[in-house]
Image: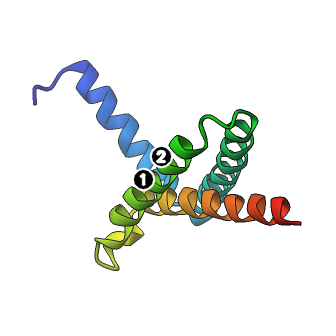
Amino acid sequence: MQNTRLNNLFNVLTRRLAEWILNPWRRVSILIISFLLGFFLGSAVATTAGQTAEWDIVVAGTLVLATEIANRIFYNRSVLARQVFWVQAINYLKVGLTYSLFLEAFKLGS
C-alpha cells in the first residue's frame, strides 16, 4: 500500500486500539458488553418476531444461520487462534443470544 496520510492514520488508530484492548480489565469488560448485547438482541428479536406471527420462521432460520456461522468461526480455529479478541467477542455475542432465547422459551412455557 502507499504511505498516505489516511493509511498512516488508520495504522495509528488500529495500533492504539490494539494496545487499549491488551489491558485485561478492558478486554473483560468489552466481552461482557458483547454478551449483554447478544442477550438484548435475542430478547428484542424474539419479542419483535412474536408480535407478528408472519416472521417467526424467517427469524428462526436467520438466528440459526447466524449461530452456525459464529460456531464455524470459533470452532474451526486452533486453541491459540480462539484467543483473538474479535473471535471471542463473536462467541460471547452468540452465547448471550442463545441464552436469551432459552430464557424466552422458559417464559413462554410457564
Whole-percent x, y for residue 74 in the image = 38, 67
**Residue 35 falls in image quadrant:** bottom right
Residue at the (75%, 62%) spot, across then down: 105
Determine the residue located farthest toward the front in the rendered image: 54
Q: Are marks 2 and 1 in contact (CB under 8 Å)?
A: yes
Point 69% across, 46% down: residue: 46
Q: Is residue 28 above or below residue 1?
A: below
Q: Which mark is residue 62?
A: 2
In the image, 104: left or right of 30? right
Q: Nearer the viewer, residue 54 or 18?
A: 54
**Kind of residue at badge 2:** Thr
Residue 65: assigned label: 1
> Which image quadrant is residue 59 in?
top right
SS at circle 1: helix
Mark 1 belongs to which amino acid?
A: Leu
Q: Which residue is pictured at 29% across the width and 36% down the height? A: 11
Label 2 crowd bin: few (<14), some (14–19), many (20+), radius 10 Å: few
Find the residue positioned furthest to the bottom.
79
Work out how far the residue at label 2 is from the one at label 1, CA to CA, in angstroms.
5 Å
